[in-house]
Each structure stands twice: as structure tokens, then as C-alpha cells.
Amino acid sequence: MNLRRWRDARWTALTLTAIVIAAGGALVAAFSDSMAVGGSVMQAPMAKKLSVNPEVHQRFQQGVMMLHAKQHEHAFTAFHRVIELAPDMPEAHVNMGFALLGLQRFDTARQFFEGAIALRTNQLNAYYGLAMAFEGLRDMPGAIGAMRTYAHLAQPDDPFRRKAEAALWEWQAAAQPGAPTAAQNRK
């Protein structure tokens, strides 16, 4: 009887393993097809550019993985190469900006976010990053303006919209005369 249960458990385990592998493969395929980049989906012309130049594709993917792993120096290196090969790719400029935010190089990050917006005015995640760069530079009017643009352009179901609205609320409250600072609120 124990042998029979063991055989049944093998088939159950085999079936579950196959389901997990299939689901994992579907997730990887969905991710690579959509080319999610910093909260937005890469537009078709840039996705085509990646498919034409294998090095651009490889470096871009490396950079995205390094950003997710918070390896900002390595992400910086990867996106630097992507921008050398494809200087008109706004997604590369945005992700370079996020790498620079991680390195706390706020002014240079601001320049990359502004460059991405110059290349494509509706590059949504560039406005979010620009707001973060302005916050790092302690330019609260700039941060509020960039985040308002992001919130205005973002879809209602955008996963970063609530975070953007919370940042706006906090920044606007702090900008009011006589408002307590964030440190005073924590006490």
C-alpha cells in the first residue's frame, strides 16, 4: 500500500512540476514580449530597434536586470552602451536616469529624464523619474510639476499612480507656509 501511495505522489509531483514550469515559461514570454521598462511598456519602434541590433537588446536587458537588482553602477554601464548604439531610444535615457538616481547623481539623472522627454513627450516614466531627480535636488516646485504631469498622463490602473499621488500630497503639504517637516511629523 505504501508503494502505491508513493507512485501516486510521483505522478502528482510530476504534474505539479509541469504546471509550474509552463506557468513560469508563460510569465517569461509575457515579460519579454512586453519589454516592461521602469513602469511603462516599450513602444513598437524601440522594440523593433532592439530586435535589429542584438547588442542593443542584450545590453538593454542587462541594464534592466541590474536596475531591478539595485546594481546601479552596472546598470549605468549597460545603458551607457545602449545610448552609444541607439542615442534616439528614450527608454535607454529613462533607465540611465534611474541608474543615476540610484547613484544619487540627481542633476545628471535630471538631464537624462529631460532628454527622454525631448525624444518622446509622452514617455510617462520619464516624468516620474524627473520628479524624483528634482526631489533629490531639493527643487520641490520642479518635483511637484513633474509628478503632476505624470499623474495627469497615467492611466487610473497604473501601478505607480498611487505612489505618485501620495508623493504629491506630501510635497504640496510640506510646501505650505508653516507646515511641519517630514521629520517633525514622524515624532
Image (tube, grey):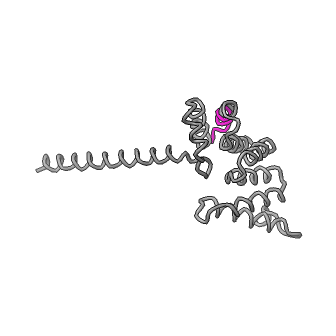
Image location of residue 123, percent across then percent down: 68, 51
Which residue is depicted at the point 74% across and 48% down?
A: 117
State whether the magenta stretch is mostly helix, strand or loop. helix
**Count of numbered circles on the image:** 0
Determine if residue 161 is in view.
yes
Quadrant (top left/top right/bottom left/bottom right) for the C terminus: bottom right
**Relative to the observer, which residue lies in front, 134 or 115?**
115
Q: Which residues are magenta?
A: 69-79
Residue at 81 percent of width and 65 percent of height: 174
Magenta includes 108? Answer: no
Vertical relation: 49 (above or below) 19 = above
| 185 lies left or right of 10 | right
Q: Residue at x 74, y 59 (%)?
A: 147
Residue 157 % position (x, y): 58, 64
Horizontal side, residue 34 vs residue 98: left or right = left
Q: How far across and down, in percent of the image, does residue 68 sit?
A: 59, 44
Extreme residue toward the left, this view? 1
Image location (x, y in percent) of residue 148: 75, 62
Residue 163 falls left or right of residue 131: left
**As rendered, which of 100 and 29 lies closer to the eye?**
29
Res 105 → quadrant: top right
Q: Please, is residue 49 above or below residue 15 in the view?
A: above
The residue depicted at 77 percent of the width and 67 percent of the height is 185
Residue 69 visible in image? no
Q: Quadrant of residue 109?
A: top right
Decide whether residue 77 is among the magenta residues: yes
* Residue 180 falls left or right of residue 1: right
Specify the farthest residue to the right: 177
